[in-house]
Amino acid sequence: MSGPGPWHAHGGEYGFDGAERVTDDGPAYDPRTDTYVGTFETESASVAVIEALASVRHCEPTALEPLYNSVDPDSLDRLVTSGPDKLRVTIHLDGFEIVVTGDCRVEITPPE
Protein backbone atom coordinates (compact mmCIF):
# COMPACT_ATOMS: atom_id res chain seq x y z
CA MET A 1 0.00 0.00 0.00
CA SER A 2 1.43 3.38 -0.89
CA GLY A 3 1.55 5.81 1.99
CA PRO A 4 -0.27 9.10 2.17
CA GLY A 5 2.85 10.93 3.33
CA PRO A 6 4.19 13.06 4.41
CA TRP A 7 2.03 13.19 7.50
CA HIS A 8 2.79 15.19 10.58
CA ALA A 9 1.80 12.69 13.24
CA HIS A 10 1.26 13.85 16.77
CA GLY A 11 2.57 11.33 19.29
CA GLY A 12 3.23 7.68 18.71
CA GLU A 13 1.89 4.16 19.04
CA TYR A 14 3.55 3.48 22.40
CA GLY A 15 3.04 6.68 24.28
CA PHE A 16 1.72 10.04 23.29
CA ASP A 17 4.31 12.70 23.86
CA GLY A 18 2.57 15.50 21.97
CA ALA A 19 5.61 16.09 19.78
CA GLU A 20 5.04 16.46 16.09
CA ARG A 21 6.94 14.15 13.78
CA VAL A 22 6.87 13.58 10.03
CA THR A 23 5.92 10.10 8.90
CA ASP A 24 4.73 8.27 5.81
CA ASP A 25 2.74 5.86 7.99
CA GLY A 26 -0.33 8.01 8.59
CA PRO A 27 -1.74 9.51 11.75
CA ALA A 28 -0.44 8.50 15.18
CA TYR A 29 -2.52 6.94 17.95
CA ASP A 30 -3.23 8.97 21.09
CA PRO A 31 -4.28 6.53 23.86
CA ARG A 32 -5.45 9.41 26.07
CA THR A 33 -8.26 10.25 23.66
CA ASP A 34 -8.48 6.94 21.75
CA THR A 35 -7.99 8.84 18.49
CA TYR A 36 -5.54 8.84 15.61
CA VAL A 37 -4.28 12.34 14.88
CA GLY A 38 -2.21 13.86 12.12
CA THR A 39 -1.97 16.75 9.72
CA PHE A 40 -1.57 16.35 6.01
CA GLU A 41 0.38 18.45 3.53
CA THR A 42 0.21 17.22 -0.01
CA GLU A 43 -3.20 15.66 -0.58
CA SER A 44 -6.63 17.08 -0.92
CA ALA A 45 -8.72 16.62 2.21
CA SER A 46 -10.76 13.85 0.59
CA VAL A 47 -7.66 11.86 -0.35
CA ALA A 48 -6.15 12.47 3.10
CA VAL A 49 -9.27 11.11 4.81
CA ILE A 50 -9.23 7.91 2.79
CA GLU A 51 -5.46 7.40 3.14
CA ALA A 52 -5.60 8.08 6.89
CA LEU A 53 -8.50 5.70 7.48
CA ALA A 54 -6.84 3.00 5.36
CA SER A 55 -3.69 3.43 7.44
CA VAL A 56 -5.63 3.14 10.70
CA ARG A 57 -7.54 0.08 9.46
CA HIS A 58 -4.41 -1.49 7.92
CA CYS A 59 -6.11 -2.00 4.57
CA GLU A 60 -6.06 -0.74 1.02
CA PRO A 61 -8.12 2.41 0.37
CA THR A 62 -10.26 0.42 -2.08
CA ALA A 63 -11.40 -1.83 0.80
CA LEU A 64 -13.14 1.11 2.49
CA GLU A 65 -16.69 2.29 2.06
CA PRO A 66 -16.67 5.01 -0.64
CA LEU A 67 -16.23 8.49 0.81
CA TYR A 68 -19.06 9.83 -1.32
CA ASN A 69 -21.47 7.70 0.75
CA SER A 70 -20.79 10.13 3.62
CA VAL A 71 -19.76 13.43 2.03
CA ASP A 72 -19.23 14.98 -1.38
CA PRO A 73 -15.42 14.73 -1.80
CA ASP A 74 -15.20 17.87 -3.99
CA SER A 75 -17.18 19.90 -1.45
CA LEU A 76 -14.95 18.66 1.38
CA ASP A 77 -11.85 19.68 -0.58
CA ARG A 78 -13.27 23.15 -1.28
CA LEU A 79 -14.30 23.67 2.35
CA VAL A 80 -10.88 22.75 3.73
CA THR A 81 -9.01 24.72 1.06
CA SER A 82 -11.04 27.92 1.30
CA GLY A 83 -12.54 27.75 4.79
CA PRO A 84 -11.17 29.19 8.02
CA ASP A 85 -8.58 27.29 10.08
CA LYS A 86 -11.25 26.80 12.78
CA LEU A 87 -13.47 24.87 10.34
CA ARG A 88 -14.42 21.37 11.57
CA VAL A 89 -16.15 18.83 9.35
CA THR A 90 -17.26 15.55 10.93
CA ILE A 91 -17.68 12.50 8.72
CA HIS A 92 -18.86 9.02 9.69
CA LEU A 93 -17.26 6.36 7.49
CA ASP A 94 -16.92 2.61 8.05
CA GLY A 95 -18.06 3.10 11.65
CA PHE A 96 -15.30 5.62 12.39
CA GLU A 97 -15.82 9.27 13.26
CA ILE A 98 -13.44 11.43 11.25
CA VAL A 99 -12.94 15.13 11.89
CA VAL A 100 -11.19 17.23 9.26
CA THR A 101 -10.23 20.79 10.13
CA GLY A 102 -9.44 23.85 8.09
CA ASP A 103 -5.81 23.70 9.21
CA CYS A 104 -5.43 20.27 7.52
CA ARG A 105 -5.76 18.16 10.64
CA VAL A 106 -7.40 14.73 10.60
CA GLU A 107 -8.67 13.07 13.79
CA ILE A 108 -10.06 9.54 13.58
CA THR A 109 -12.04 7.97 16.42
CA PRO A 110 -12.59 4.19 16.18
CA PRO A 111 -16.05 2.73 16.76
CA GLU A 112 -16.85 1.80 20.34
Image (spheres, helix red, strand yellow):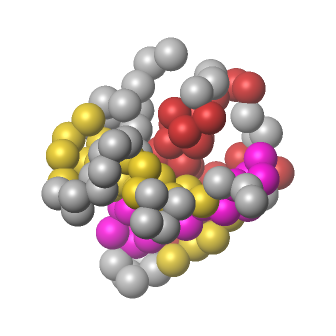
Looking at the rendering, the stretch of residues picked out in magenta corresponds to 92-105
Quarter of the figure with residue 81: bottom left
| Residue extending furthest toward the right | 69
* 10 is within the stretch colored magenta: no
Tell me which residue sits at (55%, 39%) in the image: 56
The residue that appears at 44% across and 18% down in the rendered structure is 2
Is 80 located above or below residue 3 in the figure?
below
Task: Locate residue 74, reporting x and y percent.
Answer: 61, 55
Picture quarter with the C terminus: bottom right
Instruction: Specify whether 19 is left or right of 86.
Output: left
Measured along the vertical axis of the image, is residue 53 above or below residue 54? below
Instruction: Examine the rendered structure and indicate whether residue 46 appears above or below residue 98.
Output: above
Q: Is there any visible trace of residue 51 in the rendered image?
A: yes
Q: Residue at x 20, y 41 (%)?
A: 22
Q: Camera-side residue: 74 or 28?
A: 28
**The magenta stretch spans residue 97:** yes
Q: As drawn, which residue projects farthest toward the top?
A: 1
The answer to whether 31 is drawn above or below residue 56 in the figure is below
Total marks shown come to 0
Residue at image location 45% in from the left, 58% down from the top: 31
Task: Please name whichever residue, 77 or 97, is drawn nearer the observer in this view of the structure.
Answer: 97
Q: Nearer the viewer, residue 70 or 20?
A: 20
Image location of residue 33, percent across then percent down = 48, 67
Residue 57, image x, y percentages? 62, 35
Is residue 46 rendered to the left or right of residue 71?
left
> Overall secondary structure of the magenta stretch?
strand
**In this orientation, does residue 100 appear?**
no
